[in-house]
Amino acid sequence: NVDVENLSNVGGCDYAYAHFINRYIETHTTRTLEDAENINTNDDADADPSSSVILFIKDTPRSRRFLHMPRHERFRSVSEMIHAASKGNFICGAKLDCELSPYHDTAALYRFTKTHYTRRTDLLLKVESMITDDQPYFNTHEYEDLRDFHTRALHWEFPNAQFTRVCYGGTFAVPASQVIALSKIPNTRNAMKLLEYNLQRNASTAIEEHFAERTWGGLLSTPLDEKESDILKKTKDRIMISKLDRGKTYGALANTHYSTCTFPQYATQYAKKLYSNMRSNLQS
């Protein structure tokens, strides 16, 4: 079954995602025992969260032409995302270059901010951007950075002070049971509600959407424990914090050694060059 709900055209895909999450939680945490026993297992809308995944996906064409996020290899297929989420994992719909980690230095990530934005799809399709007149409203609440948004708007912070998972591109999947489990944590549940509320601002594009994009991974994925954080700390050799990275993959952990690129056919040009040089040296 497919249920279509018309929403106000505000907050981009992030508002729709937050709205769905909050409705889903309300639906699946207020049922009585009798309701649960009478669920029709063939009805996708009423499927048990313990055996379901939620796929969040935009209407942007999933082709190389529209892979506009810097330092990304490719879009993951829908089946690939569903498979990963069914194993209990949060999974992003776009795969980063092999030398970058989806985990970011939390302190650096919190310094992310943006002063303006034009949708890339508008540029590619040569559609006149609507944000020219709305530009003064891009950051109405004058948030200094992502940390300020989390503090003032969500009253919440990333659960791991060292490393936080980030998913770019607005497409990801998560086990439904994870959403329900997180909703039982009071400050996380409150953040979910506040995220929806703060994305309702009527602007063609707003800084809140960029903050939300960098919030989903940390909000919906399982945070690294201390041992996992220590391992990750040893594998990275730099953090993407140059001016060129600001507004893109700012704060991402990086390892420029070719050994991190296990599949040369999918590696970036930089990694491919290292791999090619290595083979040449071996042959000479």
Image: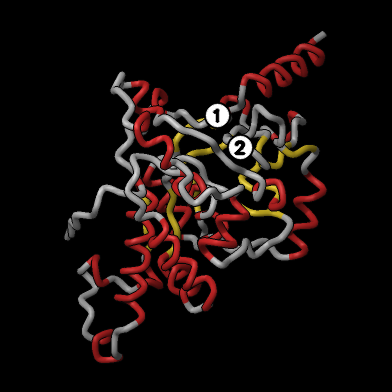
The answer to which of 252 and 143 lies nearer the viewer is 143
Residue 24 placed where, x, y %?
33, 69
Q: Which disc is residue 107 wearing? A: none
Residue at figure coordinates x 70%, y 15% from the top left: 276
Q: Is residue 78 left or right of residue 216?
A: left
Check disc 2 and report its element: helix, strand or loop: loop
Residue at figure coordinates x 56%, y 50% from the top left: 143
Q: Mark 2 points at which residue?
A: 249
Check disc 1 and report its element: helix, strand or loop: loop
The correct choice, above or below, for 69 with respect to 45 in the image is: above
User: Cβ–Cβ below 8 Å for labels 1 and 2?
Assistant: yes
> Disc 2 marks which amino acid?
Thr
Location of the N terminus by quadrant is bottom left
Q: In this view, does 25 lie to the left or right of 97?
A: left
Q: Which disc is residue 70 wearing? A: 1
| Earlier residue among tags 1 and 2 | 1
Residue at figure coordinates x 32%, y 54% from the top left: 16
The answer to which of 17 and 46 lies nearer the viewer is 17
Quadrant of the rendered image containing residue 205: top left
